Structure formats: C-alpha cells, structure tokens
Amino acid sequence: LEQRLDDIIAEFIADGPTEDEVRRAVTSNLARTIRGLEQVGGFVGKAQTLAEGEVLSDDPAFYAREFEALATLSPTDVQAAMQTWMTRPALTVILEPGERDAAYEEAASVAAGEDNAAERDRSAETLTISVERPKPAIGEVVSLDFPDVERATLANGMTLTYAQRDAVPATYVTMSFNAGSAADPVNRHGLEGLAMELFDEGTATLSAQQIAEAGERLGASISVGGGDDRSSFTLSALSANLAPSLDLMRQIIREPAFKPEDLERVRNQTITGIRQAMKSPQGIAQRTLAPELFGTTSPYGGVSTVESVGAITRDDLIAFKDSWIRPDNGEVFVISDRPLAEIVAQLNAVFGDWQAPATLRGEKSFAIEASSQGNRIILVNRPNSPQSIILGAQITPLDAGDPAFVAFNSANNSLGGNFLARLNMNLRETKGWSYGVRGGTQPRENAVVYAISGGVQADRTGDSLAEMLRETREFLTISGVTTEELERSIASEVGALPGRFETSPAVLGAMQGNALYGRPDDYFETLPDLYRAQTQDSLDAAARTALDADGFLWVVVGDAAQVRPQLEALGLPIEQREMEAGE
C-alpha cells in the first residue's frame, strides 16, 4: 500500500493533472467557499475568511484575489507547485494494529473506596478575587425571523415546500421518501441502508467515479441517506448550474444500476461496519436496546445483522426502490436564491414525467407489541473493558409535534440535556467517574424515546447507575426544576434560536422536521413565547407526565466479572448476555 501511494504521487508530479482535473478542483473549491460564506462564523464563514486574509496577506479581501488566481490556474501551474513542494523529504507514519503489549497501562482513575478530589463541597470554597472588571452588557436578543414558506405541486404530483434565501447563489434540494429503516422487512433488516448506499454507486449510464467527477465539474454534491422514518436525497448546487445538477440527481434517484459487483462491495463494507458495531461498547448497547425497547417485529426494533445483510439480493433492492422510492411516496424541499416559479420549472423538466410503478406502494405497520420496558438491567459482558457504557431508555407518551414536547425538553435541561444538567455535573464534575453523561429525547414519527447514556470507569459502574437512578427519581418527585435552572433554560433557548437557522441547510432540515412531525410552518417562530411562558410547575408537570422513574430499561456494557457484583447491590433484576459473535 505504501509503495502504491508513493507511485501515485510520483506519477502525478511527473505528469501533472489534466485540464479536466484542474477545472473540477477549481469549481469544487469555489462552490465550497460560496456555501461557507452564508454564515458569519465557523471555520469557513465571513469572519474566518476576512480574518484569514487580513492575518496572512494584509488583505481581508484576499479571498477575491484567490478566486481570480484559481480561475486562471493551469495544469502546468499545479505541476510546478507539486514539483516544488512534494519532492521534499516526507515523514511516513505507519500504525500497525495488534494486541496491547505488556507495557500498556490504563490512565490512573479514581478507585472505588479511595478519596476523590472531585468529591468536595465546592460551595464552601473561597475564591480570592484580585481584580474585578466590569461585565459587558448583554444586548437585546433579536427575534427569530424564519423564512416564509411557500408550496407548489410538481407535474408528477409531488408536493414542493420552498423558502427563499439569497445570501449566496446556491440551491439546496431534498427529495424525501416515507421509508427509512422502518421500511425494512422483518427478515431483511438493513435493506434500506444498503439500498441507499447503492443509489449513487452507479446509474444506467454513469459509474460511481463518473458521478463524482460530474458533481465536481458542476460544483454540486448529492448526499444519499436515511433515518428511522425517511430516506432522502439532497442536492447542494450552485444556482448557475442548477439544471445539469438536477439532471445528475435525476439519474441517481430514477436510474440506479444496482450492479452485482457494486452490491457485493458495499455489502462487504456494510458487514464490516456491523462487525465493528458488535465490538464497540456504544454499538453493543444500541443494538441490544432497540429490539428490547420496541419489540423485534416493530419497525423501530429491527437491527441489521451479518446474516440479514448477507441475504439481501439485487431483486430485493429493486423491490425496495419500486415500493418506496417513488413520486407518490415522497415530497420535495427546496431552499434557493431563485424564485419559486423557476424552481418548479427546473424540477418539472427532469422529474415532471416520473410516474409511480404498477407495484403497490410500501406500507409500515406500527401495531403495538408488548415491549420489555421495566426497571431491570441487561448486562452485556465485554471482558477487560476499562470502562462501562450505561444506556437507559423508555418510550414516552410524548409527540414531537405537540407543545408538551417543547416543555419536556426544557425540563430536561435541568436533568440531562446539557453540560450543566444534574446528571453530568454530578458524575463528571463532582464525582469524576465519567467524561460526560447526557439524557435526551430521540423523536421519531411514531414514538419518542427518552434515553440516558454515558461511559463510566469500570469500578464505579454500580455507583454511577445508582446516582443516575437517584437523580432521576428525585427530579421526578421531590427536586424539580429550580428558579435558577428555569431562568437559565429560557435565556439559553430563546437566545440560541436566531442563530440556529443561519444557513440554508439548517432551514432545509427544519422544514423537513416540521413536515415529519406535523408542525406548522411558523413553528420555530412560536417557540420564544412558549419558552417565556414556562414556569417551574409547568416544567415539573411535563417531566412527570412523560417519564416513569421505574420505567427505564438499562443496558450496561462492561466486564461482567467486575461489574455484576456492583449492579447486584442495586436490587434490580439482571440478565447477563455475551457479546454477539462477530462471524
């Protein structure tokens, strides 16, 4: 491998790039810069771009000169630069995986039974202040102005949800289909994920490499993926190149080749990922929890296995596409600097004649199955683990489109929603047993899960879970939201809203979320008033209505020989399992 890398670099230095390679690189660079300039901060925003130019070249407008230089760049220029810089001696670092050697030692941690410097009464400590400088005044928070949303219907019947943003000359298009991993057949878990990976691996006329090259020439990118409830294709394009970019998107969505050789290659990659998840503590916990929480026959309870992915055929992929990726099962979301009428015309030019196949449209069944929720522990033995992963969850009665969901998330800011929440401050800052613990909602179209998770040092696993149980129970009974927590939550949520939708992709995601959860178009503009109306009592009621202190199913991944005796002291039923076999 090292020799081949050296050969490729040597060939490039000797021969230089082609004109097409240079133009593709220039266009891609230009497109990335244009997209980045939509935001003020960040690593590619206006502030960073201007500051970088000022610091490195005494010219905040250096980016404009850089564009001019790129526009005239030739293959000879690139080759000369490579010959100047890439012929210097190189540092080569090789990482060889293997077993830990005898000299390996875990970093020292706080052993059970020993004094912990973090466990102290911080309120009793006195800080000496030598100089106190005046604090800058906090300005008035501007109101969120979410873009106005318009709708249209394409010639193929698909609904188009559109908002105009003219900060940069770019267009974002998402085609979202009612599928997701919830569309997987019971005996073919992983089908949706494998199919979505293959859509951009080749079309009727283009290979994966040709797709990538076409995207570079246009300054466009097309991402393909999915979640629990939706499968989507998202195009990011320069508005000047929108028509050919949409045609590339059309080929990926409507004409996937699903070639056998591509299927086998992506299948092997997917199976490798599954095997890695079966060894990862976090992966083990997630794979254990889902079927226990929802039931194995629920669309949300399925877990991809080596066997299920290995059984998927090309016919399965075609059937998935015909059943789920079709115009009568999808909708379109667009953010663009171009007017709606122009967007509709361009979409109709490439998708207007798309008709649903004769096969029946796919349907999901969310019939309720008796799940295994309850105050119990599943311990998955992972020998010699230096730390344990704790994951506890329960299905709540919440609906992500309901105001009660907003109230619950605000209440959770006190329990587990951020760094200053009680779970993290206790286990990380006070006890020093964890790098971080969080609790939060995991919304789906047909269910909202609340989960608490964190990695803890192995010899404090039982103590850590005991603290999670105590903090949660007290929060839901005798120690609800405090005045300080309420004020901090309201200020944080209201203050953060205007900055959440600085970029077009953020607005695009928000529009999709509103559609998925049945929210109104102005949903985010209504949030400040909801936040400001919250009280300690209203947040306590929201939390206590949604959560049951005895309703958590706990999954612990760790060294059973060390961890089980600690867990037994908690008095909860324990089911011990071994890790899944990797083959």
Image (spheres, rainbow, N blue to C red):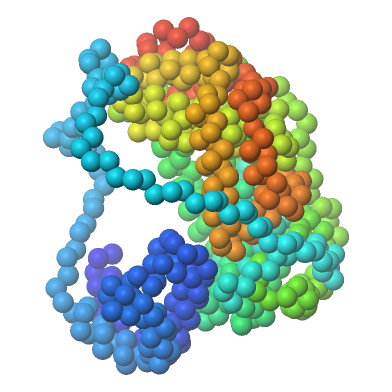
Quarter that holds the C terminus? top left
User: In the visual, does 455 lie left or right of 336?
Assistant: left
Q: Residue 255 in the image: x percent, y percent? A: 69, 70
Picture residue at 23% right of the left edge, 35% below the top: 129
Q: Residue 131: which quarter of the image? A: top left
In this orientation, which residue lies closer to the viewer: 128 or 104? Answer: 128
In this orientation, which residue lies closer to the viewer: 77 or 68? Answer: 68
User: How many numbered discs, if any?
Assistant: 0
Q: Residue 285 in the image: x percent, y percent? A: 48, 31
Q: Residue 106 in the image: x percent, y percent? A: 22, 31
Q: Residue 448: which quarter of the image? A: top right
Q: Residue 259: which quarter of the image? A: bottom right
User: In the visual, does 20 lie left or right of 255?
Assistant: left
Q: Residue 370 in the image: x percent, y percent? A: 71, 22
Residue 478 shows in the view: yes
Picture residue at 59% right of the left edge, 34% below the top: 410
Residue 318 shows in the view: no
Picture residue at 57% right of the left edge, 38% below the top: 490
Looking at the image, residue 35 lies above or below residue 143:
below
User: In the visual, does 49 lie left or right of 37?
Assistant: left
Picture residue at 26% right of the left edge, 89% below the top: 80
Quarter that holds the N terminus? bottom left
